[in-house]
Image (cartoon, rainbow, N blue to C red):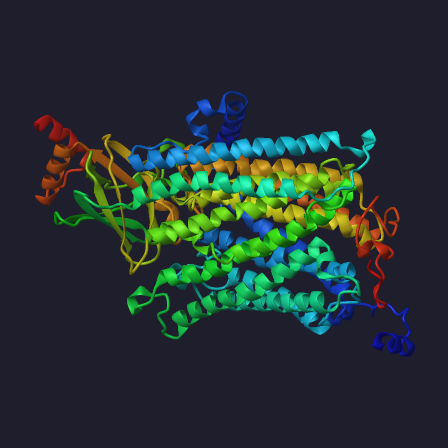
Amino acid sequence: MSLTRSVSMRLMAATAGLLALPAAHADWQLNLPPGVTEISRQIYDLHMLVLWVCVVIGALVFAAMAYALVAFRKKDGVKPATWSHSTTAEIIWTVIPVFILVALAVPSARTLVFIEDTRDSELTIKITGYQWKWNYAYVDRGYDFYSALAQTSNVARQKGSGVDPFAVDHYLLEVDRPLVIPAGVKIRYLLTSNDVNHAWWVQAFGVKRDAIPGYINDGWFKVDEPGTYRGQCAELCGKDHGFMPVVVEVLPKDEFEAWLAAQKAGTQLAAGTVSGTATAGS
Amino acid sequence: MSATTHAHTHDHDHGPPKGLMRWVTTTNHKDIGTLYLIFALVMLFVGGGMALVVRAELFQPGIQFVNPDFFNQMTTIHALVMVFGMIMPAFAGFANWMIPMMIGAPDMALPRLNNWSFWLLPFAATMLIGTIFMPGGGPAAGWTLYPPLSLQAGDSFPFSIFAIHLLGISSIMASINIIVTILNMRAPGMTLMKMPLFVWTWLITAYLLIGAMPVLAGGVTMLLTDQFFGTSFFQAAGGGDPVLYQHIFWFFGHPEVYIIILPAFGIISQIIPTFSRKPLFGYDSMVYATAAIGFLSYIVWAHHMFTVGMPLAGELFFMLSTMLISVPTGVKIFNWLSTMWRGSLTFETPMLFAVGFLFMFSIGGFTGLMMALAPVDFQYHDTYFIVAHFHYVLVPGALFAALGGAYYWLPKWTGHMYDETLGKWHFWLSTIFVNLLFFPQHFLGLAGMPRRIPDYATQFADWNMWSSIGGFGFGLSQLLFVWVVIKCARGGARATARVWDQPNGLEWTVPSPAPYHTFEQAPDVK
């Protein structure tokens, strides 16, 4: 009853959203967000480039198709032509796409080289996937912890829980203990798994990499803006694949150091309150 | 000649035997083609039903109907059924019916093999679907069956592997038959470069199948021995390599993509010239483009694995080779467009589906080019953007080509015209709903929704709701197709031999419905 009501209300809201300005509503997000790292911004630029290339080619080809569908109709008495090839035309539409591809390949290769360059990192974090949680280890600093779906989401997501997902803060995108990293530091991540394949993905960072047992993948990111960023496991890893989110809290460098020292000292304070304390203390 | 001596000893007006045994024992290419097509249609609804379970669960956030594990079984078996049980058998059905009639052959070269390759299918599919009812449920690791996850399966594991083997054997036998038929049984004068394009695309597809299916069989057999015989091909703990499986799988999996789409290209290349009343533009380059796609399909597989963590050189190679595929694919689109250019177009249902294919397959092609760029694929990979991409090439792509082909040749098969009004309704409903179903999934993927999840964060709720409405609309619209086919099989306006205004090809020289035996005397091909 309440379910059907909420469905019909959402349907109405959705219809209204479609009729009004879809993009204006946060829920009607259409495009890839640019993200907050240099990697994600480069990826975004590349995405927009190839998207516009496709839109322009698509507009030209679809316009030609639409013209043909309208202009060459038998009922308008059009007599069919009899030609069936044109070497010039065929050479043109083989060669031009090659040039377009080269124009796309060059920036793509450049970005790829940039993404794969893990040199000069200042902090290494080893991320291990488990069914169904993550382990984060600050390998040079001798500290690690597990991060799993927050209890509020875990209760709500059970079949027949009766909890409205819309009433849960960050439904399915909240964890008990987020990964905490310093802002403005080039971080190298090492990625592996303890059981099946997983993939660690934070869209805002432009980072998605598989966690595979027996393999250690690496990559890097550098986040300048403190804040909380959310992602999810992106490789099917069993029944709770949809329920192992990634949450990263980016703190100013000194707050991060204070947080890590407090954790290592065995203080059982939650990351959120620590960041408050650290700010007050400094 | 043997054909003429044969004619003396047998009464040639005899029809097929009656009853069930006709279909069980048949070696007639038309009967077997019909069996394949009916089987594919049944599987469309079986696999479609599973997709609707998925879409019902995703209609709104929260878990309403099925447990996450059953959800994963649905996505996995939906994909396996649709790929191996629906679209491949559908095109095999077209091949059986049309290739002998298009090249002027009396039947397929290996009729008993033909019977067997069909009759493996219902048993394999039943076993595959039956795994749902076994302890631990059916396969739930996705249709790619990546280890180590796939090795966590329940008792059903060997059954699903065996079903895949049977489906593969069926495909390989059908391919051998098609190659032998095309290379040996063409009527005098039917040179390779005079063959209808549908025959060409199937010839290349058959070679792709023979190259790719044994690789899949090897890969899944290694899964089986890892599970039951203590090997460690893919188990890191025993010195094995989980990524090796992914390479093996996609070395099969990428040619498989073209195994599905090339026959669709073939059907579109038959339909568009007929309703444009103009010969196919650039026949030679169409053949070469098909061959080029076939070749490239073998050297691009790791673009499914950009996030696996390859060396930079590997990522660059697979990125560039993948981008190259858009050249021959573009040639095909341009050639179809040029075929229509300055033609004299009419829009019967087959042509509507072909034009729909042209537009919507192109959308899938564009997103394909986008995800070829490895850095951007890091963001697209394993999201709904990918789901949208491959469903655009498979549903309004391959499936629309099959539906268009069915309307195109139904009058030849049944001897009756189908109901044109209902056919048009079917096309328009399918087109509207398929776009409502899949287009919003682009947005979901770009906004960050991963694929293969039974529940999602609330910001994805609105587009998922629309997508589910599209899914149910599309599924129900296909019931209309069943009605059209039944109606057409039972009666309707009599079809002439040529059926259409200006069709091209030998199949239009025999009466409608096509007699049980055609071209016992080879036709003259000029």
Q: What percent of the width, then of the height, locates residue B214?
A: 52, 68
Q: What percent of the width, then of the height, locates residue B348?
A: 77, 40
Residue at 63% x, 52% y is B44
Question: Can I make out residue B279 in this image?
Answer: yes
**Viewport quadrant of the C terminus of chain B:** bottom right
| Residue B189 lies in quadrant | bottom right
Farthest-out residue, front: A88
Farthest-out residue, top: A20
* Relative to B105, B178 lies left or right: left
**Viewport quadrant of the N terminus of chain B:** bottom right
> Is residue B198 shown above or below B115?
above
* Relative to A35, B460 lies left or right: right
* Relative to A93, B157 lies left or right: left
Of B522 and A252, which appears nearest the observer? B522
Residue at 51% x, 52% y is B74
**Mark count:** 0
Of B356 and B333, which appears nearest the observer? B333
Q: What percent of the width, then of the height, locates residue A191?
A: 27, 51
| Residue A43 lies in quadrant | top left
Question: Can I make out residue B118 in this image?
Answer: no
Residue at 85% x, 74% y is B3
Q: What percent of the width, then of the height, locates residue B352?
A: 71, 39
